[in-house]
Image (cartoon, rainbow, N blue to C red):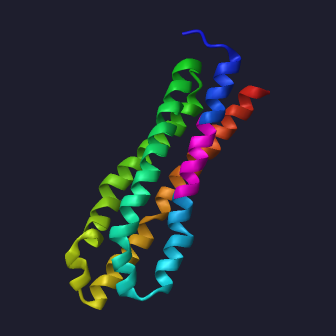
Amino acid sequence: MEVTPLVLNLLKCICIAFTSLWNGQVMYANIPEANALKEININEAIRFFPVYWPKAAKLISPTSVTALLLDLAIWWLTGEALWLVAAGFVVMNTLYTLLIVIPTVSVLLEETAQKFDETKKKTLLNKFFAIGSPRLIFSTVATILNIYATAIVAK
């Protein structure tokens, strides 16, 4: 498929914007949000999840899917491997979220989580805080790869 350089560069800029937005959302959830939860009463932190997580998922999921589709489209159009590698990091993030994060969050979302003893609540919250870092790494690497791939070709 033949695409003009202008359209291709526009796609790359849109991809960088979506990947950066996704990275920012993940960063916000893992740094200030997590630190704020660590500072408040454990019962309040547990009550926070049913309100916070569905809203965060509605924001983060579409931006990561859009970034993935744009990465794949640009790779398809250019054959440049860095875009495929960036897409791979988005896929790794998605798999990690589905296999590692969601099971922990699903327990925190249950109404029974309010009835857990303090030790179990702390254990769950600490596990949630610990499992967030790889998602931040995946999104940051994907963003850097997109910027780098654009900069290399622009030379």
Q: In percent of the image, x 29 and y 72: which residue is there?
A: 108
- Judged by its main secondary structure, the magenta piece is helix
Question: Where 122 sits versus 13, above or below?
Answer: below
* Number of callouts: 0
Could you tell me residue 142's position as x and y percent?
A: 56, 44
Question: Is residue 88 part of the magenta span, yes or no?
Answer: no
Give the magenta part as a residue range: 15-25
Kindly indicate the quadrant of the structure image that contains residue 105. bottom left
Residue furthest to the right in view is 155
Instruction: Compare residues 46 and 89 and report the one nearer the observer.
Output: 46
Could you tell me residue 127's position as x and y percent?
A: 37, 73
Placement of the N terminus among the 4 image quadrants: top right
Could you tell me residue 12's position as x and y percent?
A: 63, 31
140 left or right of 49? Answer: right
Kindly indicate the quadrant of the structure image that contains residue 65. top left
Question: Is residue 21 part of the magenta span, yes or no?
Answer: yes
103 left or right of 150? Answer: left
Question: Where 74 sits versus 136, above or below?
Answer: above
83 left or right of 60? Answer: right
Q: In percent of the image, x 52 and y 36: which residue is there?
A: 85
Placement of the C terminus among the 4 image quadrants: top right
Could you tell me residue 149's position as x and y percent?
A: 66, 33
Q: In percent of the image, x 59 and y 9: which residue is there?
A: 2
Q: In percent of the image, x 57 and y 42: which residue is there?
A: 18
Question: Where 14 sits versus 139, above or below?
Answer: above
Question: Where 92 sits versus 14, above or below?
Answer: below
